[in-house]
Image (cartoon, rainbow, N blue to C red):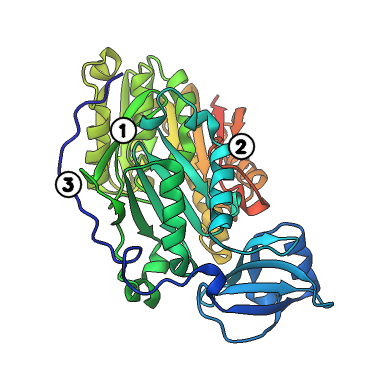
Amino acid sequence: VEAPEARRKPVDRYCSTCSGGSPVVAADERPRLAVRLTPDGLRQVRGGHPWVFEGSIRSVGAEGRSGDLAVVFDDKRRFAAIGLWDPGSPIRIKILHQGSPRPIDTGFWRERITSALDLRQVFTAASDAPQLGYRVVSGENDGLPGLVADRYAGVLVVKVYSAAWLPHLDVVVDQLAAATGVTAVVLRGSRLVQDDPMWADAGCRDGDVVRGRLEDDTIRFRENGLWFDADVRHGQKTGHFLDQRANRAAVRDRAHGKDVLDVFCSTGGFTVHAAAGGAASVTSVDLSQPTSRMVEHNLFLYDDRPALRSCRHEAVAGDAFQVLGRLADEGRTFDLVVVDPPSFARRQADVPGAERAYRRLTRSALRVIREGGTLVQASCSSRVPADRFFDLVASEADAAGRPLRLRTRTGHDIDHPVGFPEGAYLKAGFWIAP
């Protein structure tokens, strides 16, 4: 399938972060902090956990700066691990390596990136590999905690979730660009990182093109044989939510002839897949009007496809809870309802509110599902474990008098490996409603 011609609006590299801005010190030249942990903290590190919390630290040899290398020793002064020091985070050390001592140098970064790509050969070896969208590095799960890299065709989007990465970005971006062969690299920063003084001191701006050249902010890529456009410089996260790829394909397989409701639709991943699967209609709901416009844009990239052309589509901009209530009050019902909300629990204190939100969404969704219809409900809150999430959905359905029958329980797609317990953030279920 040939991609429709993309618009052309060149964007030159202008970021100074990785090209001559504030001095970048090689990892092995940065100060090393001698750190000792509590017995439990040391046990966690030796067990392979990538996080060291502030409360697990007994002593630090010096006052470190963000991005310094923290070397963890045991009580006999033996090397245990090495990681990035992050004084602005409760997760004070992001562990890079544990076991025997080894240098954190260019070779280390290259090895980690190569290992990550080896896990993704289903994408890198595909016949249409240069057109695909997939996650290249998934943070802690690939041994690079706090760093994410997503590929959209010929563009790589690197997102940092810790300012501790800023002193190391130059060499890491070089290795990522070399390993992937992309034509451009875009830098994104989490809100927390953008608020850190180091971000401004390094001359960073969210969406900076730090390698190569962009022809357009919007990059066209393929997912499950379908074309999507992602705004890699200004869109949510890195431009698209890649972790739901397999679940979107499953929705496409179930959508033929169905009326579908896609709640928290974002850029339209589930909407487009449902339409491509022959859905009679799709109603897409999101709070953002620009997002709703992006859904319609992606939906009609191929308006010459019979299934997509014949699918009736309605975009609704509004609060998901309010829209669900209004649809129910109007008596509107659907054969397939997808509820894929953002994370409701960014902190442990948010968990009770997140659980109430999941219950409320289940009850609201059941009001608009037809008899025998399918509910697809997901959670990306890592602090709400999978078993707890499925219990919440099932118990709320029982309380509403419509006990659900679980057909399929899913998680991450294969480019989002799970390397530690908290890394298993995504869970989704396919239920049949009575």
Residue carrying label 2: 398
Residue at image position (33%, 35%) is 268
Mark 2 or 1, closer to the camera = 1
In this image, 317 relative to 419: left or right? left
Residue carrying label 1: 228
Q: What percent of the width, then of the height, locates residue 65?
A: 51, 80
Q: What percent of the width, then of the height, locates residue 257?
A: 37, 14
On screen, residue 282 above or below 72:
above
* CA separation in Å, label 2 and label 3: 55 Å
Q: Amino acid at mark 3?
A: Pro
Q: Amino acid at mark 2?
A: Asp
* CA separation in Å, label 1 and label 3: 20 Å
Residue 364 appears in the picture as rendered: no
Q: Mark 1 or mark 3, which has the lower sequence index?
A: 3
Q: In what quadrant of the picture does the C terminus appear?
A: top right
Residue carrying label 3: 10
Q: Name the residue nearer the viewer: 376 or 168.
A: 168
Q: Amino acid at mark 1?
A: Phe
